[in-house]
């Protein structure tokens, strides 16, 4: 998709279609109000737009739309009016939905280009984020998976989007579009990686994709094979891959955006490319969706891509422990005890609680980078879906400051998380008579006890865990990866990099 910032006169703009917004008066009042752009076009059309809106065919509800032709006084062939909701209740989430609805209309009409004039009433402090939302929403509305389908990929007719703003907002809008394009590229990569079937997307496949990113995005990439992990005594991670013919990989991607001696942010993503549950085998129904058990790892790939394309002044380490979890004569058995890289022994009471087994060794490995913070991302527990549904990712942390950073980042870009506890009283559920820890803590509070297990390996650094089991993919007819929590992670990294720059500037002044 090609985006271009435009400062043209709306009435004279030779456009296939200009998108403008209207507001709903209120939840109680019927009728709509014109945005600043819509009001200017209405004046140029001798009140024709107002007269059409007043007929009641569009009420301003978020995502409602009305396509107009041959409006007098306007050079554009079409005007698409899209509802933005009640103005005083405006959110980035609602704005994004409105853009997606507009793009759907444009795609359905097979238009090759369009211009959006929907940013005029946005507050100055929100302009970067709302411009970013345009790019991300256009991606979301136009993304198509075609990698494993026969025939040529269908061409997407909509190829050019103009974003019309006042000249004084050109630079800030461009910044938002640039960020949005980087996130859109990251989302596209993440979704496609996650949507690939398990017979293609194996641990080795993931490692090869990381090596490609070393060339295309300037990352430093290293891949540990099973012999390397044996030397490091990663007994917990390696125990998971024993039931598969596919060898495990520990993929490490390094992005250096500032001085090498600056402590990095470490992102760790669970990379289970297929999870049958092992000996504790899952039900057959919907087991195909267990190809999505590597969505945490895919989101780390996406975050590294976005950071690189934005040239963020930050050091980032992306670690993806990758394996399959299958039943085999050599697979983990309930009751087995394995020893982690940290030296802690783990009693495996359920082989389907394998994500924490590969993450804990990756967390220990991450300590060698002296991380400023560590965030792990995993489709870890069905219990998190029971707790939060498919709306919010579960957030757990041993640091209030880090947890708040992630919560604010998610709220800003409509990729929300909700914090849950990791109290010592929950950790007691992991008590084992035969090892230092059990890998499950019983039926109650399953998402919490899983996080408490990981917390036992995060004693020496600030750590947060995102359980994305309910948000990383959709089931049913819209089945497919969502790309979450890439927007959250990227916003978190942007804010971290900006805070680091401000800190550096204040120190120079001092």
Image (cartoon, grey):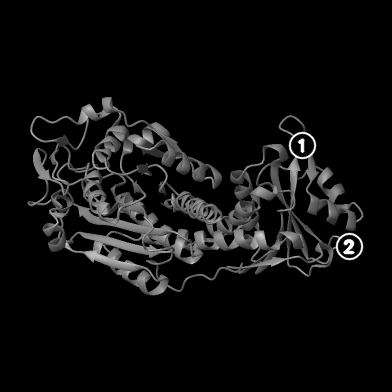
Counting residues from the start of the chain, the first of labels 2 and 1 encountered is 1
Can residue 502 be seen? yes
Q: How would you rate the neighbour count of disc 1 (Cα within 10 Å): few for under 14, some for 14-19, many for 20 or more?
A: some
Q: In this view, does 136 lie above or below 14?
A: above
Secondary element at image label 2 = loop
Which part of the image, by quadrant, shows the N terminus?
A: bottom right
Write down the residue under mark 2: 73
| Horizontal arrangement in the rendering, residue 456 relative to residue 388 (left or right) | left
- Tell me where residue 220 appears, x and y as whole percent: 33, 68
Q: In this view, does 309 lie above or below 131?
A: below
Disc 2 to disc 1: CB gap under 8 Å:
no
Q: Pick out the residue farthest to the right.
A: 46
Can residue 442 be seen? no
Q: How would you rate the neighbour count of disc 2 (Cα within 10 Å): few for under 14, some for 14-19, many for 20 or more?
A: some
Q: Pick out the residue farthest to the top.
A: 425
x 64%, y 48%: residue = 126
Write down the residue under mark 1: 25
- Tell me where residue 209 appears, x and y as whole percent: 33, 68
Q: In this view, does 283 lie above or below 294?
A: above
| Total tally of numbered discs in the picture | 2
- Tell me where residue 4 appears, x and y as whole percent: 66, 68
- Tell me where residue 301 appears, x and y as whole percent: 38, 60
Real-space Cα separation, disc 2 to disc 1, in angstroms = 26 Å
x 29%, y 56%: residue = 369
Secondary element at image label 1 = loop
Q: Which mark is residue 361?
A: none
């Amino acid at each position: 998709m090609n985006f271009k910032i435009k400062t043209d006169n709306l009435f004279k703009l030779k456009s296939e279609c200009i998108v403008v917004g209207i507001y709903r008066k209120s939840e109680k009042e019927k009728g709509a109000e014109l945005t600043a752009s819509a009001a200017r076009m209405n004046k140029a059309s001798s009140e024709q737009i107002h007269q059409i809106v007043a007929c009641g065919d569009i009420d301003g509800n978020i995502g409602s739309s009305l396509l107009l032709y041959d409006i007098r006084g306007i050079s554009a062939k079409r005007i698409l009016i899209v509802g933005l909701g009640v103005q005083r209740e405006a959110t980035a989430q609602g704005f994004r939905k409105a853009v997606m609805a507009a793009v759907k209309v444009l795609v359905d009409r097979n238009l090759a280009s369009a211009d959006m004039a929907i940013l005029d009433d946005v507050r100055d402090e929100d302009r970067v984020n709302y411009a970013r939302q345009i790019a991300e929403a256009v991606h979301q509305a136009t993304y198509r998976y075609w990698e494993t389908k026969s025939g040529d990929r269908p061409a997407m007719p909509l190829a050019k989007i103009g974003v019309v703003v006042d000249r004084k907002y050109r630079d800030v809008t461009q910044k938002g579009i640039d960020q949005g394009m980087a996130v859109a590229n990251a989302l596209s990569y993440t979704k496609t990686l996650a949507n690939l079937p398990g017979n293609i997307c194996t641990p080795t496949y993931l490692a090869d994709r990381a090596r490609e990113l070393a060339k295309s995005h300037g990352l430093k990439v290293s891949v540990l094979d099973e012999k390397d992990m044996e030397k490091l005594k990663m007994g917990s991670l390696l125990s998971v891959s024993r039931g598969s013919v596919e060898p495990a990989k520990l993929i490490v991607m390094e992005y250096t955006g500032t001085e090498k001696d600056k402590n990095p942010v470490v992102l760790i993503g669970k990379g289970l490319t297929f999870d049958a549950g092992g000996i504790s085998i899952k039900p057959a129904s919907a087991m195909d969706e267990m190809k999505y058990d590597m969505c945490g790892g895919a989101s780390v790939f996406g975050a590294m891509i976005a950071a690189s394309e934005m040239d963020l002044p930050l050091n980032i380490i992306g670690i993806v422990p990758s394996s399959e979890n299958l039943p085999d004569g050599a697979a983990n058995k309930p009751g087995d005890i394995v020893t982690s890289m940290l030296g802690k022994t783990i009693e495996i009471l359920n082989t389907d609680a394998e994500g924490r087994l590969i993450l804990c060794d990756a967390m220990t490995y991450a300590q060698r980078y002296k991380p400023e913070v560590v965030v792990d991302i995993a489709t870890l527990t069905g219990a998190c879906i029971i707790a939060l549904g498919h709306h919010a990712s579960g957030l757990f942390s041993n640091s209030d400051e880090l947890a708040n950073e992630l919560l604010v980042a998610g709220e800003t870009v409509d990729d929300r998380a909700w914090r849950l506890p990791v109290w010592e009283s929950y950790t007691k559920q992991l008590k084992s008579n035969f090892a230092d820890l059990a890998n499950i803590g019983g039926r109650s509070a399953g998402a919490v006890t899983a996080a408490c297990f990981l917390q036992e390996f995060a004693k020496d650094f600030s750590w947060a865990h995102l359980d994305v089991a309910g948000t990383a993919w959709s089931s049913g007819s819209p089945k497919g990866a969502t790309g979450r929590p890439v927007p959250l992670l990227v916003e978190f990294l942007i804010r971290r990099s900006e805070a680091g720059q401000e800190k550096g500037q204040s120190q120079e002044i001092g």
